[in-house]
Amino acid sequence: MNEKELIGKVHASVWHQCQRRGYATPVDVLMEIGVLPNHKYEDWRFGRVDYLERVCTVNLRKLSFIMNQMRVYAKNTGLKPSFCYYKRWGVKKKNGQRHNPVIPLRFSKSGDPEIERRYATHFVDTKQVERLKERQNTEKPD
């Protein structure tokens, strides 16, 4: 896939996610465009993989390009960046603990804070979120 095709796929994925639910996430874009297999994403979320980039099917240069294109599209369309904290799934309570322990997930091999923040940033279409909320409220039976 050349860069022009990849740009089209990334932008279309962000647009579709925003239309469906009002926001787009990097991991969902990676899965939708075929760079991140769903079962590998789940392995990462359950802590069976040490960092997300390890299980992506493209090299780091292409991953960086995809992430950049998401930010370009978000900026051009006025999407609001929103940081999301990713924690491990399936963590059991230990004896006597009141809360589940929170184990953060890592996205990149380097662990660079800026790269980690970019992977964890969702892009919100605030106008679409309002439309979706209105639609949901009008569809509820009294």
Image: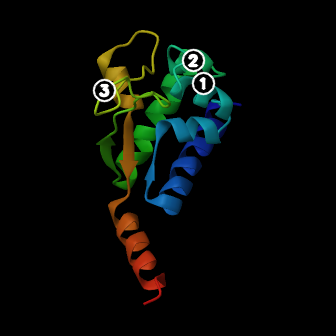
Q: Nearer the viewer, residue 46 or 29?
A: 46
Quadrant position of the N terminus in the picture: top right
Eye-nearest disc, 3 or 1: 3
| Residue identifier under label 3 | 96
**For marks 3 and 2 on the same chain, the one whose residue lies earlier in the sequence:** 2
Residue with the most extreme bottom position: 142
Query: For residue 78, which numbered disc appears in the image?
Result: none
**For the point 39% across and 43% down, which residue is it?**
122
Point out which mark residue 43 bears: 1
Q: In the image, residue 34 lies at what x, y percent?
A: 68, 35
Q: Which residue is mark 2?
A: 48
Residue appearing at x 56%, y 16% in the figure: 49
Q: Label 1 neighbourhood size at 10 Å, few (<14), some (14-19), many (20+)?
A: some
Q: Are marks 2 and 1 in contact (CB under 8 Å)?
A: yes
Q: Disc 2 residue type?
A: Arg
Q: Is residue 89 left or right of residue 96?
A: right
